[in-house]
Image (tube, grey):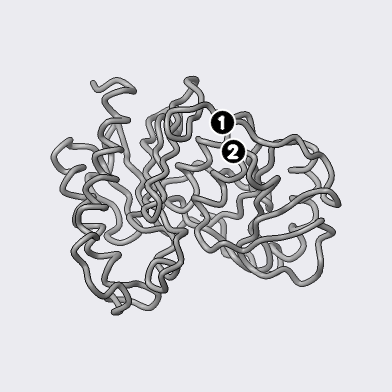
Amino acid sequence: MPDDDDLLRMCHDVVDAVAAALRPVGNWAPPGRRPGQYAIDLVADAAALAVLDRDGVGVLSEESGLHRPGSALMAVVDPVDGSTNAAHGIPWYATSICVVDSDGPRVAVVANQATGERYEASRGGGARRDGASVAPSHVAHVADAVVALTGFPSRHLGWAQFRAFGAAALDLCAVADGRVDAFSVCGRSHLAPWDYLGAMLVCAEAGATVVDGAGEELVVLQPAARRAPVASGSPALCRQLAALVAPDLASGRVAPT
């Protein structure tokens, strides 16, 4: 059975493989096989699967679904999180991979493929950005916070400022290292497990709090599951944001899975 270091190496190998596969692609904008998918998503997915098939772990991928269900280790991967950003030349897109075992998220790597910056975490082993430990801010009130958003709220939620970056995995990692004070899904938006599980482990190991805005369990491995993560370095701020976004989420909530 591989140890955490082995699994982290595998995750970094996936990031390297995706980067190498994307490098020669001249036009990143052509569509893929379904609405919202780009050709680069398919190129990146094939590269990621080649590494994960070699190591024999189960896979839950945004682009190709579930592989080897029932495996003791399941790699939840978004080959290109923020592919619209990537297709438009906006340097905020990532490869995110989280290995989940029977106890939950075990190791994760989230890498900004535009800059090369990498976050990694292991359960009980802390979180790092490019090898250096990270920690979140401790802003405790929404009125003082810079909040990264996914989705569009029906009303101003009382933040000091907000940002909408377009790649949830990196947005959550920005909470882990204090670049923003909080992250929230809002309006009628929801995320899939591959969007957030890797960054959720980075946040947790950095000392941030992550909850679902509608009170659902976040560690899920069903391809159709959708959740609404809310994160901050301060539990008090996390509770405030979750309470503020809950009414909108309830009005557009997909069926729990």
Foreground label between 2 and 1? 1
Instruction: Identify the secondary structure beneath mark 1.
Output: loop
Circle 1 crowding by C-alpha within 10 Å: few under 14, some 14–19, many from 20: many
The residue shown at (82%, 50%) is: 142
Residue ID at (57%, 47%): 172
In contact (CB < 8 Å): disc 2 and disc 1? yes
Please indicate whether residue 35 sits to the left or right of residue 249 in the image. Answer: left
Q: Amino acid at mark 1?
A: Val
Please identify the residue farthest to the front as the structure is shown: 115
Name the secondary structure under disc 2: helix
- Vertical relation: 33 (above or below) 250: below
The residue lying at 45 percent from left, 30 percent from top is: 121
Q: Earlier in the sequence, mark 2 or mark 1?
A: 1
Q: Residue 187: which disc?
A: none
Residue under numbered circle 2? 176
**Residue 120 placement: quadrant:** top left
Position in image of residue 205 (x %, y %): 55, 28
Task: Tell me if mark 2 has few (under 14), some (14-19) or many (20+) residues whose alpha carbon lies within 10 angstroms of its own.
Answer: many
Q: Nearer the viewer, residue 157 or 211?
A: 157
Residue 179 is left or right of residue 109, and the answer is right
For image coordinates 65% across by 60% down, the residue present is 149
Q: Where residue 202 sits in the image (x, y, percent)?
A: 51, 36
Q: Quick check: 210 above or below 39?
A: above
Residue 84 location, quadrant: bottom left
Residue 130 is situated, as x and y percent measured from the top left of the image, at: 43, 34
Q: Quadrant of the N terminus?
A: top left
Q: How many marks?
A: 2
Label 2 to label 1, Cα distance in Å? Answer: 7 Å
Q: Is residue 2 left or right of residue 249?
A: left
Q: Is residue 161 above or below residue 208?
A: below
Residue under pointer 1: 134
Residue 161: x percent and y percent?
76, 59
